[in-house]
């Protein structure tokens, strides 16, 4: 493998509680009923607007836009001290980078929140390329993010591994014709991941070091 394409939320960093809290705050501010946390967890990894459609049943375009704007306005205030790398992430990324692999992130998160978090978590210098939700026409599970990275890095599909914690990540990788690895410690369970038929399953991020090096 020459290029590793990683999801961020639930794969590199634990942001689950922050996302759930921010969505709850958003719905409360806009006078919508509360949503069960399990429902929110189920759709983490999709574009933000789609999360509000699927969890709160909001279909009006104007209201969806207000939800997204409200969420983004208060998200970073919840992040302070509440976003952490999963065990082994920093060390493993460093070793993969030293081995000459290209490391990229494909995320349904916006670039405006992702880049500051990468820097604050101390891993920004290890990432060669970021493709965020605003960089493609179709987000996960469509293959657009992966194909954009492959084109920019000149990497063949057979030389690329997609790593993520949701069925949306696995679907994206499969649609692009790449190998996929599902991690079980994030937002989707092992059972959920298996429904998408990933090529590999990992219980820790350090598995990548054992598998690739």
Image (tube, rainbow, N blue to C red):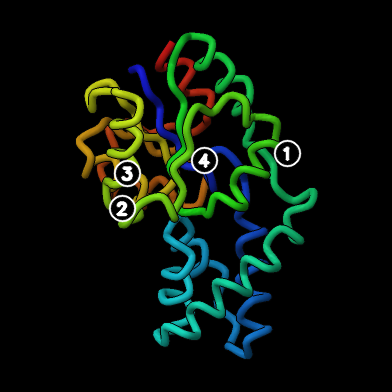
Mark-to-mark CA distance, 1 and 4 = 17 Å
Mark-to-mark CA distance, 2 and 4 = 16 Å
Q: Earlier in the sequence, mark 1 or mark 2?
A: 1
Q: Which residue is mark 2?
A: 141
How many other residues sit within 10 Å of disc 1, few (<14), some (14-19) or many (≥20)?
few
Q: Earlier in the sequence, mark 2 or mark 4?
A: 4
Q: Quadrant of residue 30?
A: bottom right
Outermost bottom residue: 31
- The picture places residue 85, in percent across and down from the top left corner, at 65, 37
The quadrant of the rendering that contains the N terminus is top left
Q: Which residue is mark 3?
A: 170
Q: Kindly identify the residue that appears in the image at 45 percent across and 32 percent down.
A: 104
- The picture places residue 149, in percent across and down from the top left corner, at 35, 34
Mark-to-mark CA distance, 1 and 2 = 28 Å
- The picture places residue 133, in percent across and down from the top left corner, at 44, 54
Which residue is more in the foreground, 78 or 17? Answer: 78
Q: Which residue is mark 4?
A: 11
Residues under numbered marks 2 and 4 in contact, where contact means CB atoms less than 8 Å apart: no
Question: In the structure shown, which secondary structural element does the residue marked by tag 3 occupy?
Answer: helix
Question: In the structure shown, which secondary structural element does the residue marked by tag 1 occupy?
Answer: helix
Q: Earlier in the sequence, mark 1 or mark 4?
A: 4
Mark 2 or mark 4, whichever is nearer to me:
2
Q: Which mark is residue 120?
A: 1
| Residue 31 located left or right of residue 138 | right
Q: Kindly identify the residue that appears in the image at 50 percent across and 16 percent down.
A: 96
Mark 1 or mark 2, whichever is nearer to me:
1
Q: Earlier in the sequence, mark 3 or mark 1?
A: 1
């Amino acid at each position: 493998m020459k290029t590793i394409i990683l999801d961020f939320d639930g794969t590199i960093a634990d942001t689950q509680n922050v996302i759930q809290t921010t969505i709850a705050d958003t719905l409360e501010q806009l006078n919508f009923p509360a949503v069960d946390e399990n429902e929110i967890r189920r759709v983490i990894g999709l574009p933000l607007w789609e999360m509000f459609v699927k969890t709160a049943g909001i279909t009006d375009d104007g209201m969806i836009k207000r939800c997204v704007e409200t969420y983004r306005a208060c998200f970073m205030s919840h992040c302070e001290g509440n976003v952490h790398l999963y065990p082994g992430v920093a060390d493993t990324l460093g070793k993969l980078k030293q081995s000459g692999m290209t490391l990229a992130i494909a995320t349904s998160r916006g670039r405006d929140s992702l880049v500051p978090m990468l820097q604050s978590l101390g891993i920004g210098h290890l990432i060669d390329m970021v493709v965020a939700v605003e960089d493609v026409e179709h987000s996960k599970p469509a293959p657009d993010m992966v194909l954009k990275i492959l084109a920019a890095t000149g990497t063949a599909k057979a030389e690329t591994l997609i790593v993520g914690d949701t069925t949306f990540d696995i679907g994206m990788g499969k649609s692009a014709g790449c190998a996929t690895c599902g991690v079980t410690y994030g937002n989707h369970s092992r059972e959920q991941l298996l429904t998408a038929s990933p090529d590999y399953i990992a219980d820790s991020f350090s598995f990548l070091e054992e598998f690739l090096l």
